Image: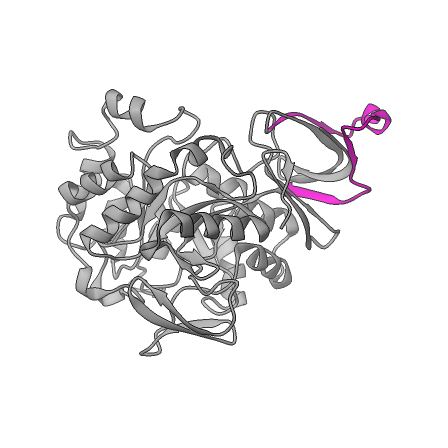
Amino acid sequence: MFFINGKIFVNGKFLPGGFHTEDGRFREILTESPEIKTIVGSDVVDLKGATVIPGLVDIHIHGAAGVDFSDCDGQELQRMAEYLASAGVTSFLPTAMTLPKEDYLRAAGNIAAFEDKIADGSANRKMARILGMRMEGPFLSPEKKGAQNEVFLRKPDLVFFREIFSQSAGRIRIIDLAPETKDADLFIKGVLSGSENPINSPELQKSYFVSPEQSSGLVISLGHTAATYEEAKRAFTLGASHVTHLFNAMNPIHHRKPGIIPAAAERENVTTEIIADGIHVHESVVKTAFKLFPRRICLISDALSCMGMPDGEYMLSGQKIHKSGGVARLENGTLAGAASSIYEDMLNLMRFGISPEEAVFAATELPARIIGNQTVGAIEAGRYADFLICDEKLNLKEVYVGGEKCRF
């Protein structure tokens, strides 16, 4: 198919033009090209000036449409993926909370069972691609547990992690960690560079990873942590490279006790993520974060099963949550995850004063880069043709996955 006469987000800019898709991928990007206006035929879609952006990529999401990833089966996971596609999220990392070991194994098994969908999305073009799995726990600080279940927190354990990793068929992409916990240094070394590294073996890489472009390995993200500046700095030196939901579940910046945020900001290889629902972080602080981490801060939803659902009672990893007025809380009043999608949050960013170019990049290409995925997140030749057709204010009109229009 040829898509012509649009305003296309390419290489960080909105440019006039279009593109050619073939076999589910972008074949050629045709921007600022006079000849594109002359293409005719039954396989041509005239965008009539509409704006086209890549499908959004959410690398931290717990649930949606009544489905809690930490406690669902394969059919429910597919329902979650189908709902996300309808909301403009065409790729995501289902994220498990802190769980008992058997629940981690079940969640990891669900991911392994979706291997064909993770590989090329061909099984159901109406659903968002499942890019792997994220473990937000159990190696976190009780002091900053937030909505995590403290009963199942544990110190970093390579043997425990390797078992979950194997059960997922090597699909774990991000593991969250509080660097001040006992044995955290050994865990980081073991996962990223030591002899215990579960992805160092060529045999495991051959059987686990579909292709080198699919992932460059594991990411250790520091989060749910009371780490000092020195503890965070040491973890980054050892290879941690990301920070979980910036400002939430960590110490604030103090002029004599700077903590994790300045430790991350001063390292240009460290990326961060933020929830921009206007509830978890004040809009002024969101704007400050984008200045503190230029082109290094990605948008996440941290959404729960109540996303896309009416107010009421839902579940989060075996705990009851209550959604009221767009806010989700535990029964004790603790603010849990979010109830909005990253599409809504991307529009919030622009409302806060972040440029459309920065907002789109933060919700598409950057999260894909963070997990080393070169197949999604950008309108670029060779990547999957996952894209969104929007109006001039980036309100969502149509969703395409693998070059095919999703009908909901």
Against 388, residue 341 (above or below) is below
Q: Picture coordinates of residue 280 (x, y %)?
A: 45, 67
Q: Is residue 271 left or right of residue 343?
A: left
Q: Quadrant of residue 190?
A: top left
Against 287, residue 282 (above or below) is below
Tell which of 292 and 72 is nearer to you. Answer: 72
Q: Picture coordinates of residue 247 (x, y %)?
A: 39, 62
Q: Is residue 349 left or right of residue 166?
A: right
Q: Quadrant of the N terminus?
A: top right
Q: Is residue 228 left or right of residue 390?
A: left
Let me know if residue 31 is in the magenta part. yes
Q: Quadrant of residue 226?
A: bottom left
Residue at position x 34%, y 64% from top? 316
Tell which of 6 and 313 is nearer to you. Answer: 313
Tell which of 63 and 173 is nearer to you. Answer: 63
Q: Picture coordinates of residue 235 (x, y %)?
A: 25, 46
Q: Quadrant of residue 31?
A: top right
Residue 129 in view of the camera: yes
Q: Picture coordinates of residue 99 (x, y %)?
A: 24, 57
Identify the residue at the far right of this view. Answer: 38
Against 189, residue 334 (above or below) is below
Residue at position x 45%, y 65% from top? 306
Range of magenta residues? 25-53
Residue at position x 48%, y 59% from top? 65
Residue 186 in view of the camera: no
